[in-house]
Image: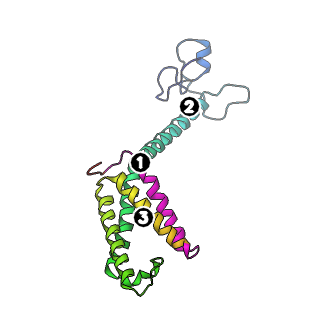
Amino acid sequence: MTKHWASGGPRSPAVGLAADAVSPTPAAPPASVSRERAPQGSVSQHAPSQESASATASAGRLAITDQAAALTAEWAPAVGRILLGLVFAWFGYHELLQPGQWTQYVPVISESSSLAIIAVLAHGWVLFVLAAALVAGIAPRAATAIASVLMLEIVIALMATGLSDTALRDVGVLGLAVCLTGVKHQRLVLRD
């Protein structure tokens, strides 16, 4: 079997397969041959080049897809870690700024007690420090492990009051934190 090249070089589909069977050197089509469809049963000299061109285009698309997949696999953990850190920073900031609005989520303790406000402030600081570690890439696996435990605590506290949209959202954030805990090598890390 002869090798077909997409470049149009010797023994390429552009020259033709029928010539390969007759002589070892490629034969050029006569000038009088039109580019019309060949009768059935005859060998078309132009169909293989069209197949080769589509195969080359398909291979090019696969190469781009493989490059995109490799780039995504390389950078997705860093992007996920930074986004998780931004979520923690957002909620930590709001817990520190207005702790009275978050006391309803503190289990077992009365919403109006000063102990609930202290618990929310402590929780806000933990979120804020974890956010800084996640965004900066300081000990990312340890930070995501602590984030996983913290999110598990939040999910359990929310599920105690019943299933809600907020609880399901936090289950997704917990899943992200757990997945990031297992990633050994990440981009944009200050200290492993």
**Dot 1 surroundings within 10 Å: few (below 14), some, or many (20 or more)?**
few
* Above or below: residue 48 compared with residue 154: above
Residue placed at 31% from the left, 52% from the top?
Answer: 139
What quarter of the picture does the N terminus occupy? top right
The answer for how far apart the CA atoms under marks 2 and 3 are is 61 Å
Q: Which residue, given by chain and number where applicable, does mark 3 sit on?
A: 150
Residue interval drawn in magenta: 160-187
Find out whether residue 14 is within the magenta segment: no
Image side of residue 178 versus residue 91, left or right: right
Q: Looking at the image, which is closer to me, 121 or 83?
A: 121
**Image quarter of residue 19:** top right
Residue wearing tag 2? 49
Numbered badge on residue 183? 1
**Left or right position of 172 against 183:** right
Q: Residue furthest bottom?
A: 112
Q: Nearer the viewer, residue 93 or 155?
A: 155
